[in-house]
Amino acid sequence: LLTVALVSTGHEVLRGHTLNTNAAWLARRVTEVGARVRVVLTVGDDLADLSRALSAAAAQAEAVLVTGGLGPTEDDRSREALAAVMGVALEHDERAWRTIRARFEAAGLAPSASQRRQALVPAGAVVLPNLQGTAPGLVARAAGAEVFLLPGPPREMQAMFEGQVLPRWRTGGRLDDVASRVVWTAGVPESEVAAPLEAAMRAEEPVVGTHPDEGEVAIRVLARGPGAASRADEVVRLAREALGPAVVSERDDERVQHALVARAKDRRLVLTTAESVTGGLVARMLCEVPGASDVFRGGWVVYSDAWKASALGVPEDLLRAHGPVSEAVARDMAERALARAPADVALATTGVAGPGPDAAGIAAGTAFVACALRDGPTTVRRLSMALPRLTVQRRVAVAVLDLARRLLAPR
Ligand code: ATP
Ligand code: MG
C-alpha cells in the first residue's frame, strides 16, 4: 500500500486566510484511489521551514505531494526547498521555459523576467506540464521519497494530480483495491445512526465512521485489499436494514433535497413552500437540484406576521392566539399554501433563528415544520436546538425537506 504525505505551503494557508481545501481534496482522492495518507503538514514560505517539512514528510511516506509555492514571485520557494533537500542545484530548463513563453504568447502577453523562476528545475527532477496555468510541476526522488510539487490554485493542482500523479502511481501498480461507500441519513441523531453499526465501527477493516453534516449524518465505509467491494457492500446492507426510512441516499452528491425531488418526480407531485424562519432556504435548496422545475414552481417567503396574514391568508386571530411560532401556524401556513398554489405538497417553516428569543419570549432554536398533502393529512414537527442562527435555519430547512421526503415514501 502506497503511503503518502501531504505538504501545504504558503503563509496565507498557515495563518488561516486561505482555507486549506487542497489538503482536504488530496486526502480524499489519495484515499479513494487506493493509497494511504500518513500525515498532512502545513508550512509557510520560509525556505528553512519548507525544507524541514519536505524532509519530515519524506521520512514518513513513500510519496510526498506538495502544493503551492510554484509561482513566479520571491515567496514561491518550493523549487528551492526541493533542490535543498535533494542536495542539488537549480538549473534553467529550456523546454519548460519555452512552454511557459508559449502560453504567454498565445494570450498575447510577454512573460516577465521573474517568470523565468518557474523554469528553474532541481538537477535530476522531471517537469510536469501544467495545462491549466503557467507554473509547471515537478517530480523527483528526494530524501528517499517520490516528491511531487503541485501548483497552489486548486483547479491547476487537481488537474495535475489526475493527469500526472495518478497515472504514474497506476502504471507502477502501487495502488490497492479500495471500495468507499457513503450512506446519507436524515432525521436521526448521530448516536442512533451509529448504534446498529457499533460492531462494524469497532472492527479495523473495513473502516466505518459516522459524520454529521448540517442536520444529516453520513456513514462512510472504506474497505481495502482483496474483496474490498463485497466487505463494503455488506456494511451498507446492514446500515440500510437498520436505518430504513432514515436513509436518504448512497451518493455524496445526493442529499435530502435531491431525494425529495426524486420522489416527487417519481410520483408526479408538485411541491410548494411557505417559509418564515428559513427565509427562502427551502426553496433555494430545492432549486439546487437539476430539473427541480419539474416539481417546484414557486412558493412564499412570509417572514413577518403581517406578510403571513396578507400574502398567505393566515388569520390574524390565529397568529394572535398561538403566536407565529406555533404548531397551529405552521399547519395553517402549509394548508394555505396548498390552497393557493397549484401544488400537491406544501412545506412550511416557522421558528426563531436567534440569537435571542422572539418578541413573545420563545427561545432561539425553536421551530415548527409542517408538510401538507393534497390527498392526506398535514404533519407538523416541533424542533428545538441551541445552535447559531444560520445553523438553525439550515437544520430547519433540512427537517422540513426530510419530513416531506418521508411522507412521499415510494409506494
Ligand atoms: P501562483 O502561481 O498563483 O503563485 P503557486 O503555485 O505559487 O501559484 P500559491 O502562491 O501557494 O501557489 O497559491 C496560489 C493560490 O492558490 C492562493 O492564493 C490560493 O488561492 C490557492 N491556494 C494555495 N494553497 C492552497 C490550499 N492549500 N488550499 C486551497 N487553496 C490554495
Ligand atoms: Mg505563489
Image: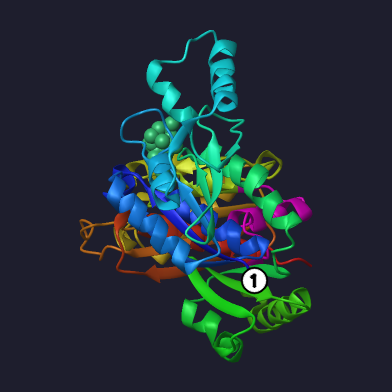
Left or right of 384, for residue 211: right
Name the residue located 74 percent from the left edge and 76 percent from the top edge: 228
Identify the image's colour scheme: rainbow, by chain, secondary structure or one colour.
rainbow
Compared with residue 301, is residue 352 higher up or lower down, i.e. above or below? below
Please, which residue is most extreme toward the bottom here? 199
The one of 378 and 148 positioned closer to us in this rendering: 148
In the rendered structure, which amino acid carries the disc numbered 1? Leu
The C terminus lies in which quarter of the figure? bottom right
SS class of the residue under badge 1? loop
Q: Is residue 53 visible?
A: yes
Name the residue located 42 percent from the left edge and 66 percent from the top edge: 327
Residue 305 at x, y percent in the picture: 33, 47
Compared with residue 74, is residue 101 higher up or lower down, i.e. above or below? above
Residue 205 at x, y percent in the picture: 63, 83
Compared with residue 374, is residue 231 higher up or lower down, i.e. above or below? below
Answer with the quarter of the image where residue 292 lies: top right
> How many residues crowd mark 1 within 10 Å: few (<14), some (14–19), many (20+)?
some
Name the residue located 45 percent from the left edge and 51 percent from the top edge: 86
Residue receiving disc 1:
1
Residue 94 forms part of the magenta stretch: no
Residue 111 at x, y percent in the picture: 46, 15
Q: Which residues are magenta?
A: 247-271
Q: Is mark 1 within 8 Å of ligand 1?
A: no
